[in-house]
Amino acid sequence: RAGRSGHSPGEVSKIICVPTNALELIEFSAARDAWHNKEIESRTLLKKPLDVLTQHLTTIALGEPTSPEKLKKEIFSTFSYADLTEAEWKWAIMFLTNGGPLSAYPQYQKAEIIDGLLTVTNKRTAQLHRMNIGTITSDTSVLIKFAGGRSLGSVEEGFASKLKTGKQFIFAGRRLELIRFHKLTATVRAATKTTKGEVAIWGGSKMPLSSELSHAVARSLHGSLESPELKAVAPILKIQKSWSALPSDRELLIEFTRTREGEHLFIYAFAGRLVNEGLGALIAFRLSKVSGESINVTQNDYGFCLGSLKGLSLDETTLRKALTTENLLEDLLECMNTAEMARRQFRYVARVAGLLIPDMPGKRKPTRDLQVSANLLFEVFTRYDPDNLLLEQSRREILEHQLELGRLQATLSSIQERPFHLIETRRLTPMAFPLWAERLSAFLPAGDAATRLERMLNELQKPGSH
């Protein structure tokens, strides 16, 4: 974490990089080169976040009565709200003063227009608003339990909300099938089929590379090996080149390998972990529709692995059809549980907009109570106000931020323009090994996975093995 190093004007940030695997050495070198070349990542700014707008309007009205026209001029001058329409502005003022479909409940009428000025007169509203100002929200935990009642543990809601009923996943060393997801509880049963599902992951373990840094890593693989990091990793890159090829952002390297677990396609898109996760789910969905076989996915910052007992191949026509932007949104919506994801996202939007009050004087509302309240509001808006702009914002943010639709679309467009480099390998290459190891550790107990990985590495290090 470098963000807090030298965290004041004029100070110098000092970053110590500790690799957890050899390939991360390439990332360190690429990051330094990108910094020297002034290749700074752009920040994607939010467009028209109406939850933040309603909170801001309440805060301003709380300070002193203000003219809506004066506020409008100020708001429209900012980047995020430059494209705000007159209708959306009027909706925000109406929602703040009237509550929309919640107009029968006084607590949702945050402000009033008195003598042409927006103002907050209710002391209770003012007190609760001051206690809950802010836009930082954290992910909540979901309890995983068997239908009989025994609990297995908890996982982040961000992972659980993506699962559809009947979907299999790996948790606590078990292969489970989701029966029901309700009120922050995922009811499961032991999976009876041999289908391999997703592995439960936590946000802190992802730490994805940005697309910019991923491309910088791809370029570093084909540059001069002058930096200390690249000199250290040169023997591994030499093996990768002799067994397969070095990935590049000018062409798409796809490796096909058979192991005792079945067939594997390793696709090196170099798009960052979040985009690779979406790509993997999308391509697995499309290929499984063609082959009828179940396909599991693992991903890292460099690419993703598709695994199946059979049905995978290096057929370029099939792969290009799967890696197209056609019907992108429809296929994403079908292969991901977007309805539940939008419901979850609405809770964050409603919290920032002031519809949910987590902090009360002297106590804090339990997460479960907040979720019940959020679900009730979601159902009310969906039924009686389906065009509610906070609902629309929730759906938009799911596509833009969780599914990375923009970057995913850009990556697929870039892939379509690149030549495919298709290679069938006799064994797992250094670039493929981390993807395969992640998959292996998900399906075997920790001790068995570690033993097998160590045995494979020892075989690799024997003289003449490469």
Image (cartoon, rainbow, N blue to C red):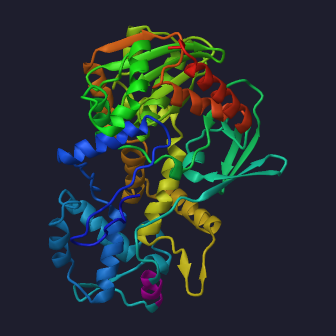
Residue toward you, 451 or 312 = 451
Q: Residue furthest front?
A: 463
Q: Nearer the viewer, residue 141 or 167?
A: 141
The answer to whether residue 203 shows anywhere in this view is: yes
What x and y, as percent, mark residue 232? Answer: 39, 34
Which residue is nearer to you in this view: 133 or 251? Answer: 251
Residue 387, visible in the rendered structure: no
* Residue 388 horizontal/vertical position (percent): 39, 58
- Residue 4, picture quadrant: bottom left
| Residue farthest along the right direction in this orientation | 148
* Spot occupied by residue 167 in the image (x, y as percentages of width and height): 64, 34
Is 61 rendered above or below residue 428? below
Please state the horizontal and vertical placement of residue 54, each as a whole percent of the image: 34, 71
* Placement of 87 over or under 340, stated as above or below: below
Residue at x-position 26% and y-position 53%: 43
**In this rendering, would 416 be left or right of 152?**
left
Please indicate whether residue 433 sits to the left or right of residue 146 in the image. left
Q: Which residue lies at the image location 23% right of the left edge and 48% below the top edge?
A: 35
Q: Would you identify the image quadrant in which residue 229 lies? A: top left
Hey, which quadrant is residue 129 in on the image? bottom left
For the point 24% across and 50% down, the residue is 42
Does residue 245 belong to the magenta stretch?
no
Residues in magenta?
A: 124-130
The quadrant of the rendering that contains the N terminus is bottom left
What residue is at 26 percent from the left and 65 percent from the top? 12
Q: Nearer the viewer, residue 138 or 92?
A: 138
Magenta span: helix, strand or loop, mainly? helix
**Quick check: is 127 in the magenta stretch?**
yes
| Count of marks overlaid on the render | 0
Left or right: residue 126 versus residue 362 is left
- Taking 127 as reference, is 420 above or below it? above
